[in-house]
Amino acid sequence: RIGKGGFGSVYKCTIEGNPKNQIYALKVVPNSRSKSLENEKNILDELKNSGNYFPKKYDAACCASFYYIAMEYISFSLDKVTIPQDKTANIKVLSIALKTLECIKVLHEHDIIHRDIKPANFLIWKDNTMCLIDFGLSTHYRVNGKHIDEGYGGSVVGTALYQSIRSHRGEISSRRDDMESWIYLLLFLFKRSDTNSELWENCEDSEMPIKKDKMARFELNKIPPLGQIYENIRSLPFKTPPNYNDYREQILNEIKKSAKNEDEINDMIETNLLDNGQEGC
């Protein structure tokens, strides 16, 4: 077993008799909690031809007392990445921003919003590209060609540390909320190793939105162009698509300012995130 939570357990496993000894991630929940895992299975089926932005699903079944999904095993998550407070910090954050942005963009192109964007839900391949996982809370923002309506969902969805401010209030999520969570993910990674900075993780839930927004508006100006992107995301109407390509170009242009040539730009984008002797799969 490599993970456990309210959702159930995740196991690192092999298939009995498999000559290649391939490793899989097996997510298991009791049948009484199978709804989210069945939702994840359906989402993965929709995403199966979308490249390495999402894990490949190998099997799923409902057994007598539990439901399971067998997926690709990827050992290293973005949650394990530490960004040192030095001159490389901005470039590392911007490199992560590019890779995670692409995963979210592709997901949204399938009319799906994630609703739980956070570092632990981005896994890292050996080539330092990213893979978005855990679709138990995901839903469609467009159904039969029609965008869902704005309103209140009656329950707060997602992980409090990275939720959008509107999600804290119980408002129905759309693409803008995934993008706002993406910004908080980047800010959290940027500031986590700064011992002189107090993040919002120890705040009461009611105080967290105020602390997040205040810190984002102050700190993101140190990582251009993320401050400007944050302001754009916060002002997006409910049904308006985020300008992913513009965000990407702004980030790339900022990286180019620090590079001497094309090779150095690529080196910066592909900065190694697999540290501490660990490898992605």
Image (cartoon, rainbow, N blue to C red):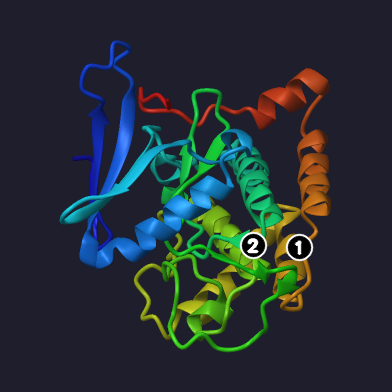
Q: Is residue 254 left or right of residue 113?
A: right
Residue 81 in view, yes or no: yes
Query: Is label 2 in contact with label 1 (beta carbons under 8 Å)?
Result: yes
Q: Quadrant of the N terminus?
A: top left
Q: Earlier in the sequence, mark 2 or mark 1?
A: 2
The residue closer to the viewer here, 152 or 148, is 148
Question: On the image, numbered disc 1 is attached to which residue?
Answer: 242
Q: Is residue 232 above or below residue 267?
A: below
Decide if residue 242 is on the left or right side of residue 2: right
In the image, what residue occupies the spot 29% across and 40% down?
26
Q: Which amino acid is tagged 2?
A: Met
Above-or-below relation of 186 to 180: above
Q: Is residue 30 above or below residue 45?
A: below
Q: Quadrant of residue 64?
A: bottom left
Q: Residue furthest top?
A: 19
Disc 1 marks a residue whose amino acid type is Pro
Label 1 Cα crowd, 10 Å radius (few <14 / some 14-19 / many 20+) = some
Residue at 63% across, 40% down: 99
Q: Nearer the viewer, residue 217 or 144?
A: 144
Residue placed furthest toward the left:
65
Secondary-structure class at tag 2: helix
Residue 65: horizontal and vertical position, in percent?
16, 56
User: Relative to 66, is 118 on the left or the right?
Assistant: right
Numbered badge on residue 179: 2
Which of 196 and 277 lies nearest the eye of the viewer? 277
The residues bearing labels 2 and 1 have C-alpha atoms spaced at a distance of 8 Å
- Find residue 89 and report its horizontal and vertical position in percent: 58, 41
Secondary structure under badge 1? loop
